[in-house]
Amino acid sequence: MTQELPLGRHVDYPREYDAALLFPIARALGRDPLGLDAGAPPFVGEDRWHAYELSWLDGRGKPCVATATITVPAASPRLIESKSLKLYLNSFNATRFADAEAVRARIAADLSQAAGAGVAVAFGLPPVDAAANGTDIDALEIDIDDYGPPNPAHLRADAGAPVEETLSSALLKSNCPVTGQPDWARVRIAYRGPRLDRAGLLRYLVSFRDHAEFHEQCVERIFVDLLRHARPEALSVEARYTRRGGLDINPWRATPGHPRPPVGRDERQ
């Protein structure tokens, strides 16, 4: 009977450390449709992962647990698929290591190899911090009936004097292209330039609702659409996705020279 139910399916996880579980994906697959040169995109940034379920055995076989912050540069030629990262981290559960530093160094080396660039790994998580979110636009009283595909035609900017502001919305939702499961995020947009029409921005973000794309690719699409349709002088886009499988991811893309947003977690993470 349980075999007929989705919740009754048994899923094995790795019984020993295995770096081959990591599944890298070329960033060019997401950038080519946007008309970007994968080797020289118009942004800088990083993908910051938070790992909440990390465990291994010490030299005497006693379990250890930790959290970790993993930072992958956006300039890396490859991103790492999230389910494969989860399985990879689970492969540490029954493996002995001399000390915590050996675990950290092993993860950093494996992820750097998979991504094709140096990946930073540190134990611990940043604090929950909503202070940098700026103006929340979710309370706007507007009608919405466009849920995909992402529609940059909603984006409009005032031709008047330039402004500098930070806008945020917790209504970004897209779907995983591998599993079809929903991905939820707060997106934070800091810019300097023509004033964005907030109603149009919110409609644009909601138009991702039925769209299937990886987290990193969604943020790059938002960045490119804003750059092309609103023409800001400076732009920063960060999305803080909610946790799935003990992991959350926070891609950030910005025009070169734009200050990095404060490192923190959303209240839903």
Image (cartoon, rainbow, N blue to C red):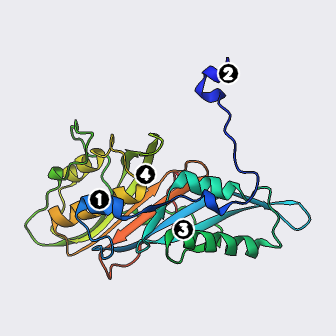
Whether pointer 2 and pointer 1 mark residues with C-beta atoms closer than 8 Å, the reply is no
Tag on residue 221? 1
Q: CA distance from mark 1 to mark 3?
A: 23 Å
Percent x, y of residue 110: 62, 70
> Is 253 displayed left or right of 53 in the figure?
left
Residue carrying label 3: 114
SS for callout 1: helix
What residue lies at 76% left-to-right and 56% top-to-bottom? 16
What residue lies at 56% left-to-right and 73% top-to-bottom? 112
What residue lies at 52% left-to-right and 61% top-to-bottom? 265
Q: CA distance from mark 2 to mark 1?
A: 41 Å
Percent x, y of residue 190: 31, 68
Q: Please tell me in which quadrant of the rendered image residue 186 appears.
A: bottom left
> Is 245 displayed left or right of 14 in the figure?
left
Of all residues, the one furthest to the bottom in this rendering is: 257
Tag on residue 2? 2
Mark 2 or 4, which is nearer the eye?
A: 2
* Mark 1 surroundings within 10 Å by alpha-carbon count, few (fewer than 14), some (14 through 19), many (20 or more): some
Q: CA distance from mark 4 to mark 3?
A: 25 Å
* Amino acid type indicated by mark 4: Ala
Give the quarter of the figure containing the N terminus: top right
